[in-house]
Amino acid sequence: QSALTQPRSVSGSPGQSVTISCTGTSSDVGGYIYVSWYQQHPGKAPKLVIYDVSKRPSGVPDRFSGSKSGNTASLTISGLQAEDEADYYCCSYADSHTYVFGTGTKVTVL
Amino acid sequence: EVQLVESGGGLVQPGGSLRLSCAASGFTLSSYWIHWVRQAPGEGLVWVSRINLDGRTTNYADSVKGRFTISRDNAKNTLYLQMNSLKAEDTAVYYCSRDFTGGSDYWGQGTLVTVSS
């Protein structure tokens, strides 16, 4: 149950796009469609922004998109806005009926 | 409005026990799996446990297996996390969350557990 690997930080200017990677193994990311992404502002609870690899919950802007290739999932934020500055975590269903989160990525809007 | 409200956190000595509660409202609790997720101060999210609709199926992270027990009382719209043999590394904010096709669509505000002598 090792954490999925995410870059520690990414940054971009308003209007630009940033992509966060989430690397696991065939026992988690590569083996299941249940990959989700969460946005967390300081002192707040996480918020679901992507589920089932690429689906957006109601109310989440279409600037957020997800994908997966092999053992790596990705979250792309297009048209970056100031309110997107937050920590982002991926999460995957894994073998033995467990879940594993990523190490987290801090997104900075320059 | 869907709400999850955790309670029961606090300061406990190493080796001690604590029971967290998660009160659900605004939806039919018995229709959803529920997770517990924790976050140590300044650290990332860590999945802890989940429970199925009727409470008969439970899963745990290796780090808490044998020490933590998840349960639910659908009649009371409440989830529980019984934590025994607590260690310093269990210090964290504990969140309950509602399962949504493998993710979690609603989260509580969290309750802080501090394990220290």
Image: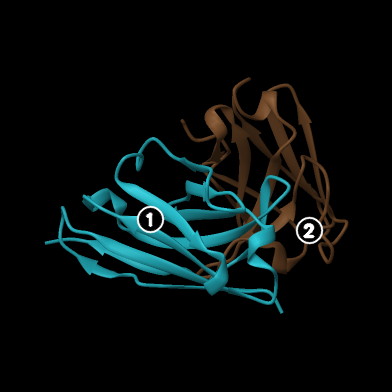
Chain colours: A brown, B cyan
User: Measured from the top left, where is residue A107 in percent x and y?
Assistant: 63, 54
Q: Are marks 1 and 2 in contact (CB under 8 Å)?
A: no
Q: Which residue is mark 1?
A: B40
Residue at the right extreme of this rendering: A62
**B83 on left or right of B37:** left
Say if residue B9 shows up in the picture: yes
Q: Residues within 10 Å of mark 2 (few under 14, many from 20)?
A: many
User: On the picture, is B100 further left or further right than B17?
Assistant: right
Q: Tag 1, which chain? A: B
| Image coords of residue A108 (percent x, y) | 63, 57
Q: CA distance from mark 1 to mark 2?
A: 29 Å
A55 sits to left or right of B35:
right
The amino acid type, in three-letter code, at marker 1 is: Ala
Q: Which chain is disc 2 placed on? A: A
For this orientation, the residue located farthest to the bottom is B1
Whether residue A3 is situated above or below residue B80 in the rendered picture: above
**Could you say where residue B65 lies in the image, as x and y percent from the top left?**
36, 39
Which quadrant would the C terminus of chain A be assigned to in this image? bottom right
Q: Which residue is mark 2?
A: A80
